[in-house]
Amino acid sequence: MPKRFLFLLAAITLLTPLLAGADSAESSLKSASPFKDFTLAQVAGGDILENRTGASQSPQIEAVQTCFLIKAPPEAVAAKILNWNPAGKSDLDVSKHLKLSGSSGPDAFAPMLETLFKGSGGDGGWLAEQSKKAKEPSCELLLTAEEKNHLAEASTPAKLTSAWAAILAHRSNTQDGPDFNHLRAALKSLGAGDIPSPSGGNRYWEIGDVSDRGSLSEGVSWSDSGSGRTRVFDGEYFVTSEYSASLNVSTLWPVTVNGKPATLVWRIDSAYANQFADQSGAERIASASLIFSSAKKTIEAIRHELEK
């Protein structure tokens, strides 16, 4: 038998454990996503592939797609995303992540907000300053006119706590906002398929600090499965500044790497912001880069927890 043939046979034998389950997972991902030329071997080493396809779906929507692998079974990956707590994780800009249940009234938010607004700095400092000038053109908070009127009357930390608690409670109980639903429609057109309603999902709210700007946000994570894959959705339907909504869709396929269960992931990260419509080409690329940077940090943090 020719030595060259023996060498090829040995190489195929060595690759077999690495590529187990690759055919169906790879072909499914390639058919749905812009990653037409990737291979499982390419991402098995830890690379995160990026594609910006979809940025032109709407002037107000920016989207980034990634392809990567996590060395853990899909059920573990899905559970981690569904219950992801970014608070305190390096570079993720979230200081508090709090679960919500049922119909959440102001009392669900007031205790943490009271602590937030007691000090003069930290996450609450910028929010308090913006709240004071809520009705001024320079205010950067993304709120309705009624909400701004409510905040403008909050002259003490106690009143500020009460005002924000009422705003968050109202937003929490009307979570399917128009911008959030625009993202659901846009991601469907990118190949993610029909995105079910988040009703019954894991609801939460967060306190964060991005570039020394305090932020409050409310979100929900939910999932579905079928056709040999699992999809996990995570979205923010209310954000106080920068962008008004975000939605991430992670599609998971089971594969085997070196004889162990792993998960091939196609993820779409998107955000809705009116300011996107006014940005130049270079500015839009910069915005996409920020979305990718944020997504990459989250992916690496989740992968670290599952692979350690």
Image (cartoon, rainbow, N blue to C red):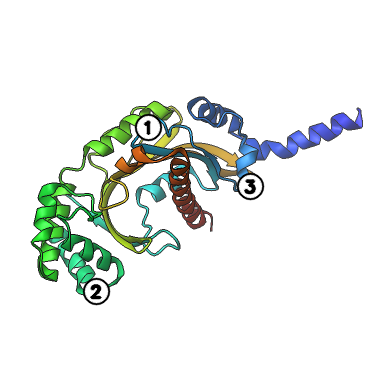
Callout in the foreground (3, 1) = 1
* SS for callout 1: helix
Amino acid identity at mark 2 = Ser
* Residue situated furthest right in the rendering: 2
Amino acid identity at mark 1 = Leu
Quarter where residue 268 is shown? top left
Q: CA distance from mark 3 to mark 1?
A: 28 Å
Which residue lies under the disc numbered 1? Answer: 187
The residue at 17%/67% (across/down) is 111
Amino acid identity at mark 3 = Gly
Q: CA distance from mark 3 to mark 2?
A: 46 Å
Percent across and percent down for residue 239 are: 27, 50
Q: Is residue 61 visible?
A: yes
Percent across and percent down for residue 166 are: 11, 56
Task: Indicate whether 36 appears above or below 246.
Answer: above
Which residue lies under the disc numbered 3? Answer: 45
Q: Is residue 97 visible?
A: no
Label 3 crowd (10 A; few <14 / some 14-19 / many >=20): few
